[in-house]
Amino acid sequence: MDRPRVVATDLDGTLLRSDGHVSGYTREVLARVESAGITVVLVTARPPRWMHELGELGVHVVALCGNGAFTYDVAGRRVVAHRLLEADVLASLLADLRDGIPGIMLATEGVDGPAAETGWEPDDYPGEWVLGPWQELAGRPVGKLLVRHAELSTEELTGLVAGIVGDRAEVSHSGAVRMTEVGPPGVTKAVALAHWCAQQRPTVDAGAVWAFGDMPNDLPMLTWAGRSFAVANAHPDVLAAATDTAPSNDDDGVARTLATLLG
């Protein structure tokens, strides 16, 4: 089995267990991977501010956050590059989504943190959020627009959002209940990962990358990588698209697959 130069993995539902943490076994395997000269890249829908807790991984990693919108230095706790949804495009999307889907709530993730319309109830760190009229969300470029609905399923909402957004932006979902994510046009996990690989010296081609994921927003990365693994708990579309399968996230599927690689 040829060893990859890069292992790219999603976090929630893939590398992390359902409680949001990694096991001691996974930490030990990741340390062995790093010692073998293989680079681990985290490719996640999480915003940069959700990466602070990942020091428990115990290895030096690069993080491509917001479905590729942000390149984040985990150790330094800083965004080092970004690909943003421009304010004028964001303004038109906000207005069209508000008119087209009754009952939605809107929020954004920017370089300087999260913002949401009044009435949005943050699931995390409430003190970090700026709340106000939805029209004010268009005042800055952002990495991601979040659309939430109290009744529509995630799949239903994503379909409606995609129909309104069209080719103006990238629409995806990462499994969050009743929520859809809208990112900059042309920006996906695959685009961000390919760009990072091209910057390495020597460059890393797709054939030297193994990718792990579980949700539809992982599909571009999984289809780009030379070898792709869907964890057993993955969305059916991901299971169908990946070249290989791995045990579930709660069974340390990424680590067990990599341990077999290392022998």
Image (cartoon, rainbow, N blue to C red):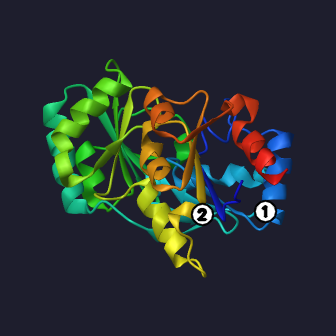
The amino acid type found where label 2 is placed reads: Ala
Q: Nearer the viewer, mark 2 or mark 1?
A: 2
Which SS class for mark 1? helix
- Residue found at the very far front of the displayed protein: 1
x and y, in percent, of residue 156 in the image: 29, 24
The amino acid type found where label 1 is placed reads: Glu
As drawn, is 263 to the left or to the right of 209? Answer: right
Which quadrant of the structure image shows residue 217? top left
As drawn, is 186 to the left or to the right of 179? Answer: left
Which quadrant of the structure image shows residue 76? bottom right
- Residue found at the very far bottom of the displayed protein: 201
x and y, in percent, of residue 191 in the image: 41, 61
Q: Can residue 68 be seen in this view?
A: yes
x and y, in percent, of residue 97 in the image: 19, 38
Residue underneath mark 1: 34
The first of marks 2 and 1 along the sequence is: 1
Point 68% across, 36% down: residue: 20
Which SS class for mark 2? helix
**Along the line of sight, the residue nearer the viewer: 7 or 99:** 7
x and y, in percent, of residue 16 in the image: 68, 39
The reply to whether discs 2 and 1 touch (Cβ–Cβ < 8 Å) is: no
Residue underneath mark 2: 208
Q: How far apart are marks 2 and 1 (CA)?
A: 15 Å
Point 76% across, 43% down: residue: 255
Point 46% across, 32% down: residue: 240
**Along the line of sight, the residue nearer the viewer: 54 or 118:** 54
**Along the line of sight, the residue nearer the viewer: 137 or 7:** 7
Point 74% across, 30% down: residue: 251
Number of the label disc, if any, that sits on residue 64: none
Q: Can residue 58 be seen in this view?
A: no
